[in-house]
Image: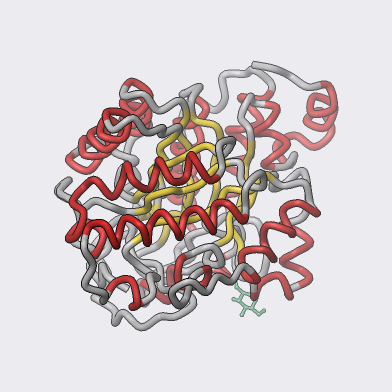
Amino acid sequence: MRLLAPVAALLAVHGASAQLHQLAVAAGKMYFGSATDNGELNDAAYVRILTDPNEFGQTTPGNGQKWQYTQPSRGSFSYSSGDQIANFAKTNNMILRCHTLVWHSQLPSWVSSGSWTKEQLTSIIETHIANVAGHYRGQCYAWDVVNEALNEDGTFRTSVFYTVLGESFIPIAFKAAAAADPDAKLYYNDYNIENTGAKQAATLRIIGSIKQAGGRIDGVGMQAHLIVGSTPSQRNLEAAMNSYVAAGASEVTYTELDIRFSSLPPTAAGLRTQADDYATVTRACLAVDACIGITIWDFTDKYSWIPNTFPGQGAALLYDENFSKKPAWTAVSTVLAAAATGGPGPSTTLTTVTTTTTTGAPAPTCTAAKWGQCGGDGWTGCTIA
Ligand SMILES: *[C@@H]1O[C@H](CO)[C@@H](O)[C@H](O)[C@H]1NC(C)=O
């Protein structure tokens, strides 16, 4: 492990209160980051934490680069929402992960409801990617080129893309992204692929099919929308990551990590379990060289997408709604600090009390506009926009 002198000094003074990005870098990772969204950037207390260069070194726009914002009607491109986050990242020296080019959700109806030939839809995908990835060329460390193409059983999800083009829409998208932004790392991104199983096996086949078609894929983004008390084991998390590397991904990363409570409010014991779960994911990333970093899907419960999509659930992030650091923050920073200083780290988790249930949410309606992101462990609701 590399030990940077300033971090060593800082740890000596502050112990585990040194901050997340700084510790992740000292532990050999590229970043610890947080997604954000346009409306939140008006909240001064929020922005103060997000822009602390020691705390977060990476960001992802939660919504503004999605198709519904970037090409709401055919041939009409708009980058104002996405540009605000990209410029924010630049101003604050944050690595930018760009999200996302081809996804069945938050897809305007002019695409999803059209009756296209293969040639027409191929051209629509290529045009969208040439414009959007071309617009952001040079600004994105990585692009989530294709998002959530799979069902839980590892079959392909029904979407206009799959219905018209079969699985060939995936290599078509990756080739278009490689042409539009040759320097961006190209990722396949999905949820419930953190663990081994049918969906992880199908992800391996996606990597293979892109390569077989002569395309380039650099990474697998594991969203990691997890549930307190049912986070996969460190061993399984590592096995999934190592499988992607063996299949030819040169890097992997947790792209949207949050670990939610199935019922609220959390108990003190529940908060400790959540801390253990965050520590497990952090340790897994540290244990796999190809895991370049961790992005949480926003950092405060105040702006989490969870309560809107999973009613009655939430409290999934490292800071509470009042910007106080939760036990999970301390757990992540402690694990990172141990790795940064080359120590073995806490050999056991903070506690193993589990008090939460893991039942799925009642199916919500599919009308949430701002937080219309579907998916995650236990998701039983809509799978189309
Ligand atoms: C945040 O502050 C409000 C107002 O003081 C309080 O009612 C609420 O319980 C606090 N939330 C948490 C998670 O502590």
Vertical position of residue 79 compared to residue 144: above or below: below
Figure quadrant of the N terminus: top right
x, y percent for residue 38 = 64, 71
What residue appears at the point 60 percent right and 58 percent down from the top-left corner?
A: 299
Q: Name the image quarter holding the C terminus.
A: bottom left
Residue plotted at (31% across, 33% down): 207
* Snapshot quadrant of residue 39: bottom right
Ligand 1, image quadrant it occupies: bottom right
Up the image or down, 16 lies above or below 223; here it is: above
Residue at 52% x, 66% y is 63
Please indicate whether residue 98 sits to the left or right of residue 358 in the image. right
Give the percent coordinates (x, y) of residue 300: 60, 63
Along the line of sight, the residue nearer the viewer: 385 or 346: 385
Residue at the spot x=75%, y=64% of the render? 47
Q: From the viewer's perspective, is residue 66 above or below residue 73?
A: above
Residue 133 seen anywhere in this rendered image of the structure: yes
25 w.r.t. 59: above or below = above
